Image (spheres, helix red, strand yellow):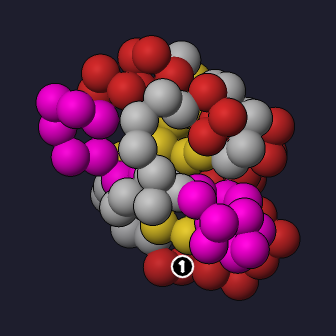
Amino acid sequence: MYQSITMPEFEQLWKKTPVKLVDVREADEFAHAHVDGAISMPLSGLEDTVDQLDKDGNYYVMCLSGARSMAACQYLASKGYKVTNVMGGISAWRGEVV
Protein backbone atom coordinates (compact mmCIF):
# COMPACT_ATOMS: atom_id res chain seq x y z
CA MET A 1 0.00 0.00 0.00
CA TYR A 2 1.22 3.49 -0.79
CA GLN A 3 0.04 7.04 -0.29
CA SER A 4 -0.66 9.75 -2.85
CA ILE A 5 -0.17 13.50 -2.61
CA THR A 6 -1.36 16.29 -4.88
CA MET A 7 1.20 18.57 -6.46
CA PRO A 8 0.12 21.65 -4.45
CA GLU A 9 0.50 19.62 -1.23
CA PHE A 10 3.88 18.31 -2.35
CA GLU A 11 5.11 21.78 -3.30
CA GLN A 12 4.25 23.07 0.18
CA LEU A 13 5.99 20.09 1.79
CA TRP A 14 9.05 20.52 -0.47
CA LYS A 15 9.40 24.15 0.63
CA LYS A 16 9.16 23.30 4.35
CA THR A 17 11.26 20.20 4.85
CA PRO A 18 13.81 18.10 2.99
CA VAL A 19 12.21 15.01 1.46
CA LYS A 20 13.59 12.25 -0.73
CA LEU A 21 12.21 12.58 -4.26
CA VAL A 22 12.65 9.76 -6.76
CA ASP A 23 12.10 10.66 -10.43
CA VAL A 24 11.20 7.53 -12.43
CA ARG A 25 11.27 9.13 -15.89
CA GLU A 26 13.86 7.89 -18.36
CA ALA A 27 17.40 9.31 -18.20
CA ASP A 28 16.92 11.62 -21.20
CA GLU A 29 13.74 13.10 -19.69
CA PHE A 30 15.51 13.62 -16.36
CA ALA A 31 18.49 15.27 -18.09
CA HIS A 32 16.16 17.64 -19.94
CA ALA A 33 14.55 19.00 -16.74
CA HIS A 34 14.10 17.79 -13.18
CA VAL A 35 13.47 19.05 -9.69
CA ASP A 36 16.80 19.95 -8.08
CA GLY A 37 17.73 17.24 -5.60
CA ALA A 38 15.65 14.49 -7.19
CA ILE A 39 17.13 10.99 -7.50
CA SER A 40 16.97 9.56 -11.03
CA MET A 41 15.76 5.95 -11.03
CA PRO A 42 14.05 5.21 -14.37
CA LEU A 43 11.06 2.89 -14.09
CA SER A 44 12.50 0.72 -16.87
CA GLY A 45 15.45 -0.22 -14.63
CA LEU A 46 13.84 0.07 -11.21
CA GLU A 47 14.13 -3.65 -10.44
CA ASP A 48 17.91 -3.37 -10.91
CA THR A 49 18.36 -0.19 -8.85
CA VAL A 50 15.80 -0.57 -6.05
CA ASP A 51 18.47 -1.78 -3.62
CA GLN A 52 19.96 1.74 -3.65
CA LEU A 53 16.99 2.90 -1.58
CA ASP A 54 16.86 2.59 2.20
CA LYS A 55 13.81 0.66 3.43
CA ASP A 56 13.76 2.89 6.51
CA GLY A 57 13.35 6.03 4.39
CA ASN A 58 10.22 7.71 3.09
CA TYR A 59 10.24 8.46 -0.63
CA TYR A 60 8.11 10.64 -2.86
CA VAL A 61 7.91 9.36 -6.43
CA MET A 62 7.42 11.55 -9.50
CA CYS A 63 7.27 11.06 -13.26
CA LEU A 64 5.90 13.17 -16.10
CA SER A 65 2.18 13.01 -15.25
CA GLY A 66 1.67 10.38 -12.56
CA ALA A 67 1.16 7.05 -14.37
CA ARG A 68 4.74 5.73 -14.17
CA SER A 69 5.14 6.97 -10.61
CA MET A 70 1.97 5.10 -9.67
CA ALA A 71 3.40 1.90 -11.18
CA ALA A 72 6.71 2.53 -9.39
CA CYS A 73 4.91 3.09 -6.08
CA GLN A 74 2.99 -0.17 -6.49
CA TYR A 75 6.25 -2.03 -7.11
CA LEU A 76 8.21 -0.32 -4.34
CA ALA A 77 5.41 -0.77 -1.80
CA SER A 78 5.24 -4.47 -2.66
CA LYS A 79 8.96 -4.67 -1.79
CA GLY A 80 8.42 -3.01 1.60
CA TYR A 81 9.38 0.59 0.80
CA LYS A 82 7.46 3.58 2.20
CA VAL A 83 6.45 5.61 -0.84
CA THR A 84 4.08 8.39 -1.83
CA ASN A 85 2.99 9.02 -5.40
CA VAL A 86 3.20 12.68 -6.46
CA MET A 87 0.10 13.09 -8.62
CA GLY A 88 0.43 15.20 -11.74
CA GLY A 89 4.18 14.67 -11.99
CA ILE A 90 6.65 17.22 -13.24
CA SER A 91 4.01 18.46 -15.70
CA ALA A 92 2.18 19.95 -12.72
CA TRP A 93 5.32 21.22 -10.94
CA ARG A 94 5.32 25.02 -10.74
CA GLY A 95 8.76 25.45 -9.22
CA GLU A 96 12.15 25.72 -10.86
CA VAL A 97 13.79 22.84 -12.67
CA VAL A 98 17.41 22.16 -13.48
Q: Is residue 41 visible?
A: no
- Location of residue 92 (image quadrant): top right
The residue carrying mark 1 is 51
Quarter of the image for residue 3 reads: top right
User: Considering only vertical position in the picture, is 98 above or below 92?
Assistant: below
View extreme (bottom): residue? 48
**Which residue sits at x=70%, y=75%?**
27
Is residue 73 within the magenta segment? no
Q: Residues within 10 Å of mark 1 (few under 14, many from 20)?
A: few
Residue sitting nearer the eye, 28 or 24: 28
Residue 84: horizontal and vertical position, in percent? 52, 35
Dot 1 falls on a residue whose secondary structure is: helix
Image point (73%, 44%), residue name: 64
Q: Quadrant of the N terminus?
A: top right
Quadrant where the C terminus sits is: bottom left
Describe residue 69's horizontal placement relative to residue 39 as left or right: right
| Residue 71 horizontal/vertical position (percent) | 79, 45
Q: Is residue 80 left or right of residue 73?
A: left
Q: Which residues are magenta?
A: 14-33
Residue 67 pos. (x, y %): 81, 37
